[in-house]
Amino acid sequence: MENRLAVWKKILFGLLAAAGVTGLLTATTAVFFYALGSAAPQASPAAGEPASSSSAAEEEEGPLSTWEFTGQPDDWRLVLVNFEIPVPAGNDPVLETVGTVQVDERIVEDLERMIGDAAQEGLTLTLSSGYRSEERQGELFEQAVQDNLSLGMSLQMADMVAAESVARAGYSEHNTGLAVDLNGVLETFDETAEYRWLQRHAYEYGFVLRYPEDKTELTGIRFEPWHYRYVGREHAEKMRLLNLCLEEYVAYLDEQAARG
Ligand SMILES: [Zn+2]
């Protein structure tokens, strides 16, 4: 049990290697995610059944559910929102405008410091997106589906491919005000000096690259070099040291707490 995460990591690594993820074209990626989707989690274990003792239950779980989610952490900075977990009820961040976007006011100081410090080194970080209402998120998702349909995909495929890059309404971190998209949301952002600077320094300001290239099977989202999530400095530093994405980190903290 205590090494479960490590074991899963090995399994996932094997899966990744087998799938040959590196350099996949969009179409292939779609097939990959389709395969993952078909191995989607079965219903949760029956209530009262000890969650940790059943290896059969583990076998039934798809790779996307290898982290255990036992509820939102108390810490607002760690709220977990992904394709399976919606924004918590009552989500209503107090917003503040930075540049042309709005974000949760609690992250403004660190965000502005990050942008300012980057500028000191001659690097330009611009905010392309911050808080989005759930309604706006729904519009973006629907637009992505329509784009895929116009490429000739079936509705099911169009929906699935859209979900790789655009979250459904209520399932986006942008709905929390704790996430920002930088520098025009470009696929090539990871080739820039700004990206390399963020790789080295974002954690110092409490931000993490939310959808890293080596964690797509856990986040359910393809590599997004432009999307950063505020988790606060302590957490960002730990996540970096342990090389954990937010799904893994929340599960890790749960495990630590359970051990006392
Ligand atoms: Zn984003």
Image (spheres, rainbow, N blue to C red):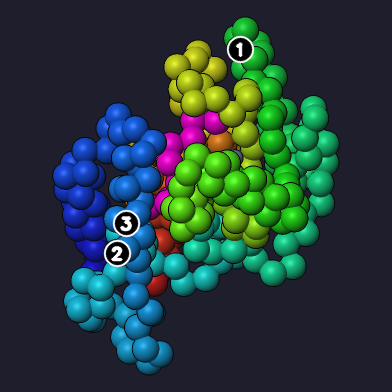
Q: Nearer the viewer, mark 1 or mark 2?
A: 2
Q: Counting residues from the N terminus, which is met first, the one under dot 1 or under dot 2?
A: 2
Please name the residue that numbered disc 2 is placed on: 39
Point 46% across, 58% down: residue: 156
Gap between marks 1 and 2, in whole Å?
43 Å
Q: How far across and how far down the image is residue 92, in percent?
A: 78, 59
Q: Quadrant of residue 80?
A: bottom right
Label 1 secondary element: loop
Please name the residue that numbered disc 3 is placed on: 36
In the image, residue 164 sits, relative to residue 213, either above or below, namely: below
Is 255 included in the stretch rendered in magenta?
Answer: no
Q: How far across and how far down the image is residue 233, in percent?
A: 56, 40
Point 30% across, 29% down: residue: 23
Residue type (three-letter) at the residue carrying disc 3: Leu
- Say few, some or many: other residues with alpha carbon within 10 Å of mark 3 (under 14 / 14 to 19 / 20 or more): some
In the image, residue 100 sits, relative to residue 251, either above or below, namely: above
The one nearer the camera, 26 or 256, is 26
Gap between marks 1 and 3, in whole Å?
38 Å
Q: Which mark is residue 123?
A: 1
Q: Nearer the viewer, mark 1 or mark 3?
A: 3
Q: Quadrant of residue 42?
A: bottom left
Q: Quadrant of the C terminus?
A: bottom left
In the image, residue 188 sits, relative to residue 67, either above or below, namely: above
Point 30% across, 33% down: residue: 24
